[in-house]
Image: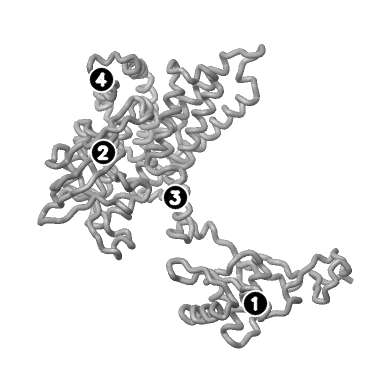
Amino acid sequence: MNVEEFPWWTKEQRQLAREVEEFSREVAPLVEEADWRAKLGMLDGSLPWDSIPQELKKRMVEKGYFGAMIPKEYGGMGLGATGSCIIAEGLGPAYGSFVSTAIGGTHQIIRHGTKEQKERWLPKIASGEISGAIGLTEPFVGSDAAGVETFAVREGDEYVINGKKRFVTNLGYADLYIVYIKTSEKPEDKAAYRHMTALIVEKGTPGFTVEKVNMLCTLDPPQLNGYLNFDDVRVPVANRIGEENDAFLGVMVDGLNFERLMICALTLGFMRISLKYAVYATERRIQFGKRTIDFESNQYRIADMITNLKLARLMTYYSAYLADLGQEPIIEATLIKIFAAEANSKAALDAMQCMGGDGLTKMYPVESIMRNMLMNVIGAGSSDIMKRLLVRQATRYQVGLMLEDLELPRRRLHPELGVPVSDWRGELKPKLTAKDPEGRVLEALALDYKVNPGLYMTREDLEEDTDLKGEELDKVLMSLEEKRLVKLFRLHGVIRLAKALYTGLKKVKPQKFYSWYPPWVKEKLFPAPQMKPMFETK
């Protein structure tokens, strides 16, 4: 047993980790033989994506692994997200279909499905009898998930779906397809992200067909991935997950968070393999009279691999723990998707560098990991999109989940030193001398210029310093803007930031007010009469 356990794991989860590690060693010869038969074209008429023998799936079913996260009352193991991550890390690199099954709607049914939906499908998923898939991406809609064009119209107790989905993994094999459909054309609904509905479409439904199969450079062993077409597909309302028009902020976001978590767990398995082969090869390769592991460049690569693997495992299983507690690991799932995907990419590259030419050959699994890692970087949200999303989730730009962590005190001028200092308690709040509202705003902006000369002042800070609120402040700011004394920044039509233009600074205070010099600067260097030292020295 060489899988690191975490203190918060339950006894059952610890036991599962040990069993999965042992099981992965038992089935390794079976998996490797099947993989080589696929590479050598010795499949006896079978398709490439069937290269993993049914014996492996049968043994996984016997172990109950497909039901790891499914509650016991529905035939599962009841080990939650953590249990699924343990299996994905241990077996995912060899049997990616497990991850496809785990993320193929199971989580959405558990969290958002009706009692009837759970009773109907979860026991069959746990037993390996059926599997699922997700349909979100479309030919013209990728990262902009809210822009889906596939639509459904309600007719009595049915929805009629028309459109297309693509990049659907487990295509053809899945029995259940959870698809995200546009069900409202109202602009106000789309603006509020209340225009999408999640529906379960069952395999074999009339009008529901596979349009095209993708040939991807990733996914060893191969899995079917491609396009779905919906031509007047009728789905009963009973197959709806959650409420109508509520899928985006509920079912979909929750499902994507879980999908990202599972992909991260899968990357852990790949990272472990890359690290093992990097060490294995460099301990046995002799160049210039010494082992290649003794070269510092390779030691640095291996050190990075160890560091990133440890951090990625900690972050992944902490996120899974939060999910099992019933919390939404929104930021955690996003940041670990970024970190794990990029760490996995680096680990694969570093392993190939450590192994040299051998790493390029199919005699070792590193070249396969190198191709598979592209799926982790792009799937369930590319790293670029994830970074954009993380900023939106964390800051006041959109969601603001980290506002308390990002809070800074007001920076105000020290009365003696004339330099910016922190003012947590508001003790340095300026006493504005101007009587009229426009004068108070300009004076507040002038003081802020001395503290933050390159930054705009926020609306909230202006309200605090001037005691002007809402429409009253808007009126003053727009008047000053019209007079070309201030410049405003608007977000969605709302004034958010303001700064005084040079004309405004000049109007409200003399130049001497803005001057500041350290005490060691000699006056003869700056002969301007308005020079004011930082503080007087005796």
According to the picture, the residue beneath numbered tag 2 turns out to be: 227
The residue tagged with tag 2: helix, strand or loop? strand
Q: Would you call the spot at circle 4 few (<14 residues within 10 Å), some (14-19), or many (20 or more)?
A: few
Please name the amino acid that badge 1 sits on.
Thr
Q: Residue at x 44, y 15 (%)?
A: 363
Circle 4 is placed at which residue position?
55
Q: Quadrant of the N terminus?
A: top left
Q: Going 29% across and 35% down the picture, which residue do you hit?
A: 169
Q: Which mark is residue 234?
A: none
Q: Is residue 276 above or below residue 81?
A: above
- Residue drawn where x is 29% and y is 40% of the image: 166
Residue 25: image x %, image y %?
38, 19
What residue is pinned by disc 3?
A: 331
| Mark before the other along the chain sequence, 2 or 1 | 2
**Between disc 3 and disc 2, whose residue precedes?**
2
Q: The residue under label 4 is which amino acid type? A: Glu
Amino acid type assigned to the residue bearing label 2 in the image: Tyr
Earlier sequence position, callout 3 versus callout 1: 3
Comparing marks 3 and 1, which lies closer to the viewer? 1
- With 344 as the anchor, is 202 left or right in this view? left
Bin the neighbour count of mark 3 within 10 Å (Cα to Cα): few under 14, some 14-19, many 20 and up: some
Cα–Cα span, label 2 and label 1: 60 Å
Q: Secondary structure at mark 4?
A: helix
What crowding class fits label 1: few (fewer than 14 Cα within 10 Å), some (14-19), or many (20 or more)?
A: few
